Image (spheres, grey):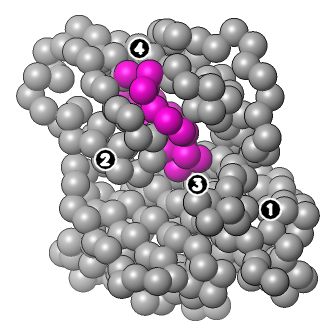
C-alpha cells in the first residue's frame, strides 16, 4: 500500500495528519507493506520530521513493514539530512531514493535528538540560546522568554509523558524574508488529557481539544509551584510573532500572533506533539 504523503507541498503538521487518517483505514490492516512516499515534498519541517519518526515507530511496534521514498527535490533532501530524518528512519524502514552526498544547504538545525533526561533539555536550550542571539537578533530578555518556553515543553516530556521524546529544530527564512527558528518537541506517551487526569478526575471525561485548551489556560498536572505551563508558552509565541501547534489525542490546535486559535479534529494518535516558531526581531 502506497501513501503519497506530501504531494507537491511539504512534510508538515497537515501532511502528518493526512498520513494518520489514511493509516486508520481498514485496508491498512491487511497491507503486507506500507510505502510512505515523500518524493514530491518541497520541504521537510522539523515538526513533520519528528512526527513521521513517531508514526513509523508506532507502525513497527505493531509489526507493520514500512518503506519510505525520500524527496527528490534538492531543498527537501538537504533538510531530510540536516534534520537527521534519514538517519532516524534508516534502522526502522527500507529507504528508497536515498541521497548519496547532498551539498550542504544554507540552513542550520538541530538534528532529531532524544529527550530522556534533564541533561538532554540543557543541550536543546544551549542550541536555542546561540541561534536566537546570532540568527534572530534576540537580546537577553528575549532569549530568557524563549528558553523558558522550550524548557517547559521538553520537561513536560520527562515529567508527564511516561515515555521518551524527540526534539528537532531548523532555521529558515519566511516568505517575508525574516529568519525563523522552528522547533518540534514530540513524544509517544499518554497525552495531555491523561496527564491532567492524574490530578483532575473530571479531565478523563473531556474531549482532547478541551484538555489542550485547559492546559493553554493555565491548568497543569504539576504540583503547585511547578512549571510555567502552556499558558506562558502561548503568551511568548504571540509576543514574538510566532506560531504554536499542539496535537494530542484526536485534536490539533494552532495559535499564532495574528489569528484566533484554530481547533482541528483528526485521527487519534498517542502522546503529544508540539511545534513552535520564533521569528526574527524587526529593527
Q: Between marks 1 and 3, how big is the CA–CA gap?
A: 12 Å
| Residue highlighted by disc 1 | 128
Q: Residues within 10 Å of mark 3 (few under 14, many from 20)?
A: many
Residue 271 included in the magenta stretch of the image: no
Residue 219 - label: none
Whether residue 51 appears in magenta in the rendering, the answer is yes
Earlier-in-chain disc, 1 versus 3: 1
- Across and down, in percent, residue 251 comes to 28, 63
What is the residue that sits farthest to the left in this orientation?
A: 26
Q: Nearer the viewer, residue 247 or 242?
A: 242
Q: Secondary structure at mark 4?
A: strand
Q: CA distance from mark 1 to mark 2?
A: 27 Å
Q: How many marks?
A: 4
Mark 2 and mark 4: Cα distance apart in space: 19 Å
Residue at the disc numbered 3? 184
Residue visible at 57% across and 65% down in the picture: 276
Numbered range of the magenta stretch: 37-61
Amino acid at each position: 500500500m502506497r501513501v503519497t504523503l506530501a504531494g507537491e507541498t511539504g512534510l508538515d503538521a497537515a501532511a502528518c495528519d493526512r498520513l494518520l487518517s489514511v493509516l486508520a483505514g481498514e485496508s491498512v490492516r491487511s497491507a503486507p507493506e506500507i510505502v510512505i512516499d515523500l518524493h514530491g515534498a518541497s520541504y521537510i519541517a522539523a515538526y513533520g520530521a519528528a512526527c513521521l519518526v513517531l508514526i513509523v515507530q508506532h507502525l513497527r511496534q505493531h509489526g507493520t513493514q514500512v518503506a519510505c521514498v525520500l524527496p527528490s527535490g534538492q531543498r527537501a533532501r538537504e533538510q531530510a539530512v540536516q534534520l537527521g530524518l534519514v538517519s532516524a528512519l534508516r534502522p526502522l524502514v527500507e529507504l528508497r531514493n536515498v541521497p548519496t552526498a547532498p551539498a550542504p544547504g544554507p540552513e542550520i538545525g538541530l538534528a532529531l535528538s532524544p529527550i530522556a533526561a534533564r541533561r538532554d533539555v540543557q543541550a536543546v536550550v544551549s542550541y536555542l540560546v546561540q541561534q536566537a542571539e546570532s540568527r534572530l537578533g534576540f537580546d537577553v530578555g528575549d532569549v530568557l522568554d524563549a528558553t523558558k518556553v522550550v524548557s517547559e515543553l521538553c520537561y513536560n516530556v520527562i515529567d508527564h509523558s511516561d515515555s521518551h521524546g524527540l526534539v528537532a529544530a531548523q532555521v529558515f527564512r519566511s516568505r517575508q524574508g525574516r529568519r525563523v527558528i522552528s522547533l518540534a518537541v514530540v513524544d509517544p506517551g499518554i497525552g495531555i488529557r491523561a496527564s491532567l487526569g492524574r490530578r483532575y478526575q473530571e479531565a478523563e471525561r473531556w474531549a482532547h481539544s478541551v484538555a489542550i485548551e485547559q492546559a493553554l489556560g493555565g491548568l497543569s498536572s504539576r504540583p503547585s509551584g511547578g512549571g510555567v505551563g502552556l499558558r506562558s508558552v502561548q503568551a511568548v509565541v504571540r509576543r514574538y510573532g510566532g506560531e504554536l501547534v499542539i496535537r494530542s489525542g484526536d485534536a490539533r490546535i494552532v495559535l499564532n500572533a495574528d489569528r484566533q486559535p484554530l481547533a482541528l479534529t483528526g485521527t487519534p494518535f498517542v502522546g503529544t506533539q508540539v511545534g513552535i516558531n520564533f521569528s526574527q526581531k524587526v529593527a
